[in-house]
Image (spheres, rainbow, N blue to C red):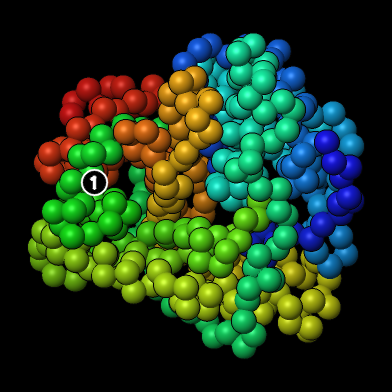
Amino acid sequence: MKNREIRWDKLDNTANLFPVIAREGMSNVYRVAITLKEEIVPELLQQALERVLPYFDVFNMKLKRGLFWYYLESNEKPAPLVHEEYEYPCQYINPYANNDYQFRVTYYGRRINLEVFHALTDGNGALLFLKELSYCYLRLAHKELQEVQGESLSANTSLDSRDSYLDNYKQKAKKGYKTEKAVIIKGEKFYKSQYGVIQAYINLADIKRVSKVYGVTINQYLVSAYTYAIYKGYLDGKPSSHPISTCVPVNLRPYFGSETTKNFFAVVSAVFKPTEEHYEFEDVLRIISGSLKEQISKEHLEELFSYNVSNQKNIMLRAFPLFLKNIGMKLVYNGSARANTSTLTNLGVITVDEAYRDYIESFYALLSMSKGQNLKGAVCSYNDTLVFSLSAAVRETDVQKEFIRRMTEDGIHVEIETNGVYDESLSKM
């Protein structure tokens, strides 16, 4: 194991916001999870975490408050304790009860959950850590795997902790997005930090076939189906003076040749404004897929994050003390939050090293709630299954039902699973 050199580190451009807005009920914590084909042995999972954590500088940090910015400092405390899951997912991480770490590892049955405060990294960075943790666990549990790679990391795992925003931004970038007050999904709220989860297990071959028939990518189809479900399930297919606006995070690593384990994504907006009396799904699909195709280019993505980095590097703004920056960032965030209906993130196709494939069943991702967004979606694919996870702060399930109905009407095989709070409602589907 290499000697760790990083003693402190700046937050990346995206991460600066999260410590400012995080609180109980809006944790800015997300989950990536892996389900194995065997029950988890907690003692072995704890050992695996203690072995893997020192390699990952991004995770082996504690968050500190400075005079001008929050920053990260090396955490010399023992790894956080692994425990069985006993509460709702993606809860606020209290560092004082977690050895100052900004992530947690839990297990339930055959599943390992990694929950991460977004200031550390994005979903792609978290997946790297989760896979290495799982590989190490499986080697501890199975003698036949102990010679696969010894104590070293997979050759496919990056430990790069550079700030790729700073490495790739262009000066004098203009603001690459506009804001307009969007549809907000309202309803009867769950109690405090509780929320409901519905997971749709979708046959990957089916959705590939259907997307090809429509002439769109899988992601364009999913975002369009999700938007249409909000239009039908929440707006009842009626006109609205406000658009349905869905945030779609885009992994920037492939566009800029980055392998960073820090945050490196930009967010585009899939916007549909139902001004007319009636829209078919094909109408929404045409509008949303065209918008995403236009926005997801290297040039536009570069413009989006470069504008934000330019603001961060502004000499005047940098001189403001942190408490003033916090006030400004909260005001900007509260304003932008009104422009978003929901978020739908797609982590893409997950691959694992061949030696471990027979031991791994599936993956999934899950998002927590944020201001104004009471329903969110997260997608990932493994082997022949795409898992679409819908998390909600409201009890009503009309949107979720419409989304699943859209899939089945297109001939896509879907199986659903919930965290139990929706059992009575979904039995009426």
Q: Where residue 277 sits: x, y (%)? A: 10, 66
Q: Nearer the viewer, residue 97 or 395?
A: 97
Residue 29 in sight in this render = no
Q: Quadrant of the N terminus?
A: top right
Residue 10: name its quadrant.
Answer: bottom right
Q: Where residue 359 sits: x, y (%)? A: 49, 19
Judging from the image, what secondary structure is the residue with disc 1 in?
helix
Left or right of 265 on screen, residue 427:
left
Residue drawn 73% across the image and 78% down it: 313
Q: Where residue 43 sits: x, y (%)? A: 71, 13
Residue drawn 64% across the image and 37% down it: 154
Residue drawn 48% across the image and 64% down it: 267
Residue 358 in sight in this render = yes
Q: Where residue 105 sits: x, y (%)? A: 65, 28
Residue 274: name its quadrant.
Answer: bottom left
Q: Which residue is mark 1?
A: 208
